[in-house]
Image: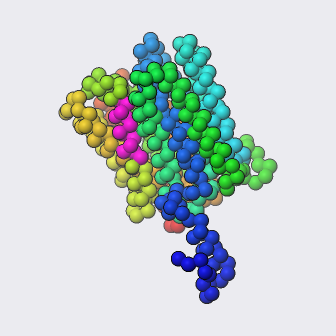
Amino acid sequence: MTSTPDTHTSPARSSTSSTAGAREGFLDRIGLPSSLKWGFLGLLVFMIGDGIELGYLAPYLQSQGIGEGQVALLFTVYGITVAIASWLSGPMSQVYGPRRVMWVGLAIWGVLEVAFLTVGIGAMNVPMMLLTYALRGFGYPLFAYGFLVWIAAATPARRLGMAASWFWFAYAAGLPTLGSLVASLAIPRIGTMGTLWLSLVLVVVGGGLALMAMAGVRGGGPLARPGASPFAAMASSISIMWREPISTVGGLVRTVNTSSQYAFFIVLPAFFMDVIGFSLEQWLQLLTVMFLGNLAGNLLSGWIGGRIGLRNTIALMGALGTAAGILALYYVPQMAPGSFLVASVVAVVYGVMLGGYVPLSALMPMVLPQDKAGALAVVSLGAGAATWVGPIVVAAVQPLWGLEGVMWTFAVLYVLSGALVMLVREPRV
């Protein structure tokens, strides 16, 4: 490519082409917006910190005498606040700008984590655990999904599919992939509480890096007209669910997407440690392997979506693939008790297929281009709802039909989500 303008091309067009060519580097060519690169890196580190506790917090609290019902309640109230914050991230980003919303999320996470570790876990005070952990649940969705709105605002529609894939790649690389790996390495060396304090350090470092390095980057400021009311924005992000019913379909599909993941954090540690015979470290390493597969699936689904369509990728790879992966995750390891290799293979299959839902974050803003933030608010609400829908399914089904019933229930839910997403008409871009 030469930098000399074609004399047969209009000046405006040649200028645009030259500018685009000059700005498009390696990151842009692989679908990762280079202007937001520090945001992706900061999100990765932030989510590593947030994900450290997921694989072992429940068994640790139970080992300290906290009842299973109390632990389930802890995760349920946390999931409710996560769902609320996930929804708020859209309208708040619309009015105040994604960058400010991310700062608020970072501050909430940091302050409430200190409280959770001192007056909550430190004192083994269950009411304070519930209060501080629930309030901390407002933190990561405001940070993470605020950045997702920033991506949607700054990325052309034709590139949004791969940009969303990179967002979920960074997100899942931290929570729980590398978070679980860090936990498995840190616990034997600095102990359980030391590892929890390490999570705070990583969240602050990652969040600070993203926000300070992206100061002034396009898309970080308010997206609504000046003087827009936050209450009107919140009302709009709710009313869009009946003004544009297809947005509700997107939210329901997104809820199913990671609902099994949050359920498995509760039920699978005991399954793999007590039934399959793994140690806590092996279970945490299996989680890492599982979500390394998910990282590959996140990027693979973006590539596949560009070839067979975003909707078809979600239905075939995401819905049907994950349903099959869930059943394999339960039945196959029991055929080879104690085999980490066998368990790893099916864990990778589940993780890869779960990544098939990633195109949903690009599909819904494309379906509703007149209100991208509203569409993403509903998708984010679904993502937040998954954190408590998963545990509720466990609480409702496990006492009646055991873990096997839980796995079949999720398999059916994933198949239904595939049928739902086929109601969405994918626009051409």
Q: Position of residue 282 (x, y in %)?
A: 33, 29
In this picture, residue 311 sits left or right of residue 281: right
Q: Which residues are magenta?
A: 283-295
**149 in relation to 203, above or below:** below
Quick check: is 287 in the magenta stretch? Answer: yes
Looking at the image, which residue sits at the far right? 227
Residue shown at 65%/49% (left/top)? 214
Looking at the image, which residue sits at the far left? 335
In this picture, residue 21 sits left or right of residue 64: right
Q: Position of residue 257 (x, y in %)?
A: 44, 43
Looking at the image, which residue sits at the far bottom? 8
Residue shown at 67%/54% (left/top)? 217
Q: Position of residue 272 (x, y in %)?
A: 30, 27
- Depth check: give the residue in front, 304 or 225: 304
Q: How many marks?
A: 0
Residue shown at 54%/63% (left/top)? 25
Residue shown at 63%/87% (left/top)? 7
In this picture, residue 181 sits left or right of residue 14: left
- Depth check: give the residue in front, 321 or 6: 6
The picture quadrant where one finds residue 400 is: top left
Tell me the colour scheme of the image.
rainbow
- Depth check: give the residue in front, 239 or 81: 81
Evaluate whether residue 268 shows in this view: no
Quick check: is 412 in the magenta stretch? Answer: no
- Depth check: give the residue in front, 118 or 314: 118
Evaluate whether residue 337 shows in this view: yes
Q: Main secondary structure of the magenta part?
A: helix
**388 in relation to 188, above or below:** below
Q: Position of residue 307 (x, y in %)?
A: 40, 64
